[in-house]
Image: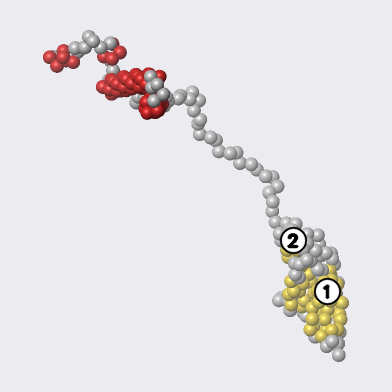
Amino acid sequence: MLNNNLLAIANPALSSDLAGMTNTAFMRFLLQGLIKLGFIAGALIFLFMFIYGGIRLASSGGDKSAVASAKSILANAVVGAVILFSLFAIVNLSFDPNPPGPTARTSPTPTFDPNPPGPTAPPTPTFDPNPPGPVVCIMPSSLSGTPVCNGTSSDIRWSWGAVSGTTQYQLQTDREGNFNPADRTLNMPSIPFPNPPTTITSTNHAFNVDVYGRVRVIQSTVCNFDSAWRYPGSPIRTLSCP
């Protein structure tokens, strides 16, 4: 109880503003007051020196040493005053009369959404009445073969009708005609694209024999299943080459 009463005693010589200051604020106030008092005293001293130097200069009577001494006093007074007022300005700028205090920590105010988002419904599946399926390629419109001799090689030059969108053809030849298996299988190169060649020569056949042939589409940009085979009307009879 006694300690609380002692703490409650206020100095009547201090104003209510000073009595309510914290220790740090009071020390700042006291330090600022002392600095201002020092600046005032310094200003008075330099003013006195300036007046004194002026009196010495006026009463020198042309004496060179007296004139030089008076001018030195005046110069020192002016330089000292400039330095004093510069320091005064710097100190005033460095002292903040309202230093920032500790800021209170605030927590974000929770917001209430009257219509919170609920679970989203899964997308409705779509039904395609005509789903994409396998597309069979169109077979070549015709196939013909011409027997030729290339030196001692009995060859057959095959040709067929082009199919739009085709990138590669396949030709097979067979002596029996059942193609099980075929004697030869020739895949046409897919270059130049998109119009690969529609002719090919099968070489080194036996002399004077019947050779069956067939051709189909195996690669295309407009279909994804090989076409049916195209057969010639009759087998091709090879030549007897010397």
Count neighbours of disc 2 (C-alpha within 10 A) and say few if under 14, some if 14 to 19, many if 20 or more. Answer: many
| Residue for point 75% across, 57% down | 222
Label located before the other in sequence (1 or 2): 1
Disc 1, SS: strand
Q: Is residue 141 left or right of residue 219?
A: right
| Residue for point 79% across, 84% down | 204
Q: What residue did someone put label 1 on? A: 158
Q: CA distance from mark 1 to mark 2?
A: 21 Å
The colour scheme applied to this rendered structure is: secondary structure
Q: Quadrant of the C terminus?
A: bottom right
Q: Residue 108's spot in the image, x, y percent?
A: 41, 26
| Residue for point 81% across, 74% down | 200
Q: Relative to the observer, which residue lies in front, 112 or 34?
A: 34
Q: Is residue 237 left or right of residue 76?
A: right
> Does 105 appear above or below 122?
above
Disc 2, SS: strand
Q: Relative to the observer, which residue lies in front, 62 or 82?
A: 62
Residue 69 is drawn in which quadrant?
top left
Residue type of the residue flagged with mark 1: Trp
Q: Would residue 103 be visible to someone looking at this image?
A: no
Q: What residue did someone put label 2 on? A: 220
